Image: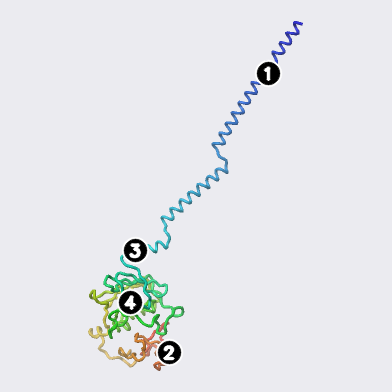
Amino acid sequence: MKKKINYLISLLTITFIVGCTNVEEVSTTDVNLEAETKTETQKNDKVPNEETIVETNENSEKENLDLTDDNEAIDNPAVEETTTQSNHELFAGYKLIEVDGDDLSGYREPNVVVDIGFGDREYWAFTNKYGQLVRVITNEIILQDDSNEPVLSSGRYYSDEAKVPGVESDVLDEGHIIADSLGGVSNAYNITPQDSTLNRHGDQAYLEDTIRSAGGATNFEAIISYPNTETQIPLSYQYTYTVNGNEIVDTFDNVNPDEVNTSLGLTESEPDDSTSSPPEGDISSIDTNSNGQVTIKEAEAAGFSMPIMSDHWLYHYMRDNDNDGMVGE
């Protein structure tokens, strides 16, 4: 009996020892598992997955792009703003005003700038503080377009020109700084009282023909000088312009070139034949609007047959638009 009891005690002791060992092993396993889980979680917290990296990079690139766009907007303003700024600099000290191309008033406001180009042309005319027209500039001279613009039979946009003080003289024309054929209007900001012969047959007519023959011009500038601050009749003109890549400078006084040539002894020889241009005034009965030019309509009304060839005396008073030596073909 005593042996049996001792056996039971031994068995219980062994069972207790084994149970403690299992509990310790389970506890150790749980602790290890918890530690591994914690470590894995920390790894996941520190190292984002690939999708997270891509999204973060895209957001960074978008932020950088937005910042770049803002910087470009500051460093590279729009073309329109640049043009406006250039005009502001060009017009500094002048008031920009609008005047109708056919305004016949001879009055000019002082210290203003006016666009004297017909249609969309930008020809800028400037006055000084005395209301004198002193400068005209444009980047490009665009010739008159007879087929698409409202051009009269006289070759002009308007039937008359501004009455600038001085043009009432018998020897002074309403002279355009930029002629109708070159796209200029007829208000006071493009008209000066100019010697009739100079305007019709002299240097003024020559430079206009040069630009027409070249199909236009670039970098055009006219500087008009006066003998005093009281008159609107110029003393002299200086034109600078570029045609076919060549810069031309024409400077001449506002005088009758024939009289100057005579005084210099350059017109003593007699005309060779009857085809020479007639003296000034011979076309008065033909030139019905007294603008110094004869239109096809005016010539036909006077009894002349078309075409008028280059060796005909009337040819010199007419416009040969295609420069083929005949008018009205």
Give the spatial CA distance, label 1 vs label 4: 121 Å
**10 Å neighbourhood of mark 4: few (<14), some, or many (≥20)?**
many
Residue that numbered label 3 is attached to: 89
Give me the disc on residue 188. 4
Tell me which label, 3 or 2, sits earlier in the chain: 3
The image quadrant where one finds the N terminus is: top right
Give me the disc on residue 19. 1
Mark 3, mark 2: which one is toward the viewer? 3
Give the spatial CA distance, label 2 vs label 4: 35 Å
- Image marks 2 and 1: residues in contact by CB distance under 8 Å: no
Mark 2, mark 4: which one is toward the viewer? 4
* Above or below, 303 relative to 164: below
| Residue type highlighted by circle 2 | Pro
Q: Secondary structure at mark 3?
A: helix
Residue at the spot 57% in from the left edge and 44% down from the top edge? 51
Q: Secondary structure at mark 2?
A: loop
Give the spatial CA distance, label 3 vs label 1: 100 Å
Mark 2, mark 1: which one is toward the viewer? 1
Counting from the top left corner in percent of width and height, residue 235 is at: 25, 77
The image quadrant where one finds the C terminus is: bottom left
